[in-house]
C-alpha cells in the first residue's frame, strides 16, 4: 500500500520568554508571520497502522452513544499497550475486534483514550483537522465582530486536548494531551492557513502535560512579544500577559457575565475580588460606575489592570489593593466600606474529586465573608470555575454562606461560560463555569 504523505513542522527556532517587558505590541502594529517552514514527512500515524484497543461493553455503550473518553479500567489490557508510544493513534474495538472509532491513546494516564472520530471507517488526517478548525472559526466569527475569542474549546469543538485563544493576530495555545501533541503536524498548519498569526504562544506550563509525559517549557513561534497584548471586548480594551499570566493569558469565558455586571454598574460602587487584570472592574468603570475597587494577590495582574484603566480613561474611578482575598475579608480588619455590587470570581477551589467537600466548604466561607461587603439591597455575584463543583452543590454552598452571614437573598441570574466555550453534548465536565447573581436584602 502506498504511504500517504503529510506535512510536519520543522524544528522551531529558539523560543523566547521575556520577563521584563518595556513596551506593548498591538496585533495591528506587527507584521504577519509567514507559515512555518515545512518538510515532507512520512509519520507513523497512518490510520491503517493505528493501534487496535479492545474496550469492554460499558465503554462500547458510551462510545457508540457519543462519549469521547475511554478510561483505563474499560480497556482489555495487554503488554503490547504498555509498550506503545503515548499519544499514538488507536482504533477502539469491541470484543469481536469490530472497530467503533479512532482516537489517541496514552497507556500512562487513567483517562487513556480520546475519541476523534466515530465509525468503522473513520479517518484522522489533515483534512479532518482543517475542517473542524474552520467550522469552529466560522461559529466565532458570526458571534464576535472583533477576532478576540476562544477559537477552540477542546471536546466542545471535537478537538480533545486542544485549546486555542485568539487575540487578533496572536494565538495562545494549550496542548494538554500527548495525542494532540503527536498530531500537531496535522492541525498546526491549518491554524496558520486560517488566521495568519504573527505570533503563536504555546502555554505548555500545565500540570496536565506532566501527567501526559510532555515537556512543560513555554514556547513562542514567530515574532517575539514585547509586552502584554490587547484584548478587545465591546467598548473595553484589556491587557493580557500571554507568557507569564494565568492559563492562556485571559478568561474569555466570563465575557457575558462581565457585560451583565457592567450593565448594572452605572452610578454604583463596585468591589471586584480576585480581579485579576480587571475583568469585571474595568467594564463596570467604563459603563459609568461611581467607583471600582479591585483586589488581587498578583502585582502583575494589578499592573495590567492599571495600564488598561489608563488606556480606557477610567483610572480616576479605580482603586487597586494587592492582597490575598481572604486576608482582605478578615472580619478583624474590616474597614467598614460597603459596596453596591460585589463580584467574587475565585480560581478553582477543587482540583480533583477528593477535594470536593473541602472546596465546597471554601466557597461557603468565601460567600459568608464577602457578602458582608455588600450594601443592603445590593448585588452579589459569585462564580466557580471548578468543574467538580456541580451547579446545585455550588449554589447550596453559596447560599449557606449568605444565610450564615445573616443575609436574605433573591437569585437574579444563573449563568455559564460565554458562547465561545461550547459544551460537548455527552461531557458535562465541559460545562465547568457557574455564575450566580443575587440581590441581597437588609442585614
Image (tube, rainbow, N blue to C red):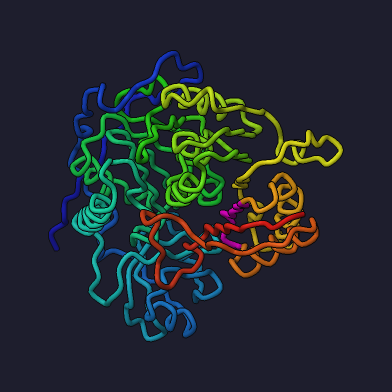
- Magenta-colored stretch includes residue 385: yes
- The residues colored magenta run 379-388
Left or right, residue 151 beside residue 1: right
Residue at horizontal 45%, vertical 26%? 308
Magenta span main SS = strand
Q: Quadrant of the N terminus?
A: bottom left
Q: Is residue 318 visible?
A: yes
Give coordinates of residue 10: x percent, y percent: 26, 35
Give coordinates of residue 297: x percent, y percent: 66, 32
Front residue (pair 53, 80) = 53
Give coordinates of residue 101: x percent, y percent: 32, 73
Location of residue 27 (image quadrant) = top left
| Location of residue 273 with respect to 6 vertically, above or below | above
Q: Quadrant of the C terminus?
A: bottom right
Location of residue 290 (image quadrant) = top right
Residue at horizontal 24%, vertical 66%? 123
Left or right, residue 329 beside residue 413: right
Q: Is residue 356 visible?
A: no
Amino acid at each position: 500500500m502506498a504511504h500517504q504523505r503529510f506535512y510536519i513542522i520543522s524544528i522551531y527556532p529558539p523560543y523566547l520568554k521575556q520577563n521584563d517587558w518595556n513596551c506593548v505590541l498591538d496585533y495591528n502594529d506587527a507584521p504577519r508571520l509567514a507559515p512555518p517552514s515545512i518538510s515532507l514527512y512520512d509519520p507513523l500515524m497512518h490510520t491503517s497502522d493505528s493501534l487496535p484497543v479492545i474496550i469492554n461493553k460499558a465503554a462500547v455503550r458510551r462510545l457508540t452513544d457519543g462519549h469521547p473518553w475511554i478510561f483505563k479500567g474499560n480497556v482489555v489490557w495487554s503488554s503490547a499497550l504498555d509498550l506503545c508510544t503515548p499519544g499514538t493513534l488507536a482504533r477502539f474495538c469491541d470484543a469481536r475486534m469490530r472497530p467503533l472509532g479512532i482516537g489517541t491513546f496514552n497507556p500512562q494516564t487513567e483517562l487513556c483514550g480520546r475519541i476523534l472520530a466515530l465509525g468503522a471507517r473513520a479517518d484522522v488526517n489533515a483534512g479532518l483537522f482543517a475542517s473542524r478548525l474552520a467550522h469552529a472559526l466560522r461559529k466565532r466569527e458570526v458571534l464576535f465582530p472583533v477576532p478576540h475569542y476562544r477559537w477552540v474549546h477542546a471536546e466542545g469543538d471535537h478537538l480533545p486536548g486542544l485549546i486555542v485563544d485568539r487575540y487578533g493576530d496572536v494565538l495562545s495555545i494549550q496542548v494538554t494531551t500527548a495525542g494532540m501533541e503527536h498530531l500537531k503536524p496535522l492541525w498546526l498548519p491549518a491554524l496558520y492557513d486560517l488566521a495568519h498569526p504573527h505570533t503563536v504562544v504555546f502555554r505548555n506550563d500545565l500540570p496536565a502535560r506532566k501527567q501526559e509525559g510532555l515537556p512543560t517549557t513555554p514556547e513562542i513561534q514567530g515574532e517575539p512579544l514585547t509586552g502584554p497584548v490587547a484584548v478587545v471586548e465591546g467598548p473595553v480594551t484589556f491587557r493580557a500577559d500571554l507568557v507569564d499570566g494565568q492559563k492562556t493569558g485571559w478568561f474569555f469565558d466570563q465575557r457575558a457575565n462581565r457585560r451583565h455586571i457592567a450593565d448594572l454598574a452605572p452610578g454604583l460602587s463596585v468591589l471586584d475580588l480576585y480581579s485579576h487584570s480587571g475583568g469585571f472592574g474595568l467594564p463596570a468603570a467604563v459603563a459609568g460606575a461611581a467607583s471600582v475597587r479591585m483586589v488581587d494577590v498578583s502585582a502583575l495582574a494589578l499592573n495590567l489592570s492599571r495600564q488598561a484603566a489608563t488606556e480606557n480613561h477610567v483610572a480616576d474611578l479605580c482603586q487597586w489593593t494587592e492582597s490575598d482575598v481572604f486576608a482582605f475579608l478578615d472580619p478583624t480588619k474590616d474597614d467598614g466600606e460597603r459596596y453596591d455590587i460585589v463580584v467574587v470570581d475565585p480560581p478553582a477551589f477543587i482540583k480533583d474529586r477528593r477535594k470536593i467537600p473541602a472546596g465546597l466548604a471554601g466557597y461557603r466561607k468565601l460567600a459568608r465573608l464577602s457578602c458582608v461587603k455588600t450594601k443592603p439591597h445590593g448585588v452579589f455575584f459569585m462564580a466557580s470555575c471548578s468543574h467538580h463543583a456541580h451547579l446545585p452543590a455550588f449554589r447550596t454552598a453559596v447560599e449557606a454562606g449568605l444565610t450564615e452571614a445573616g443575609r436574605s437573598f433573591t437569585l437574579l441570574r444563573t449563568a455559564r461560560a460565554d458562547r465561545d466555550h461550547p459544551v460537548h453534548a455527552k461531557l458535562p465536565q465541559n460545562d465547568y463555569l457557574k455564575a450566580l447573581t443575587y440581590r441581597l436584602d437588609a442585614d
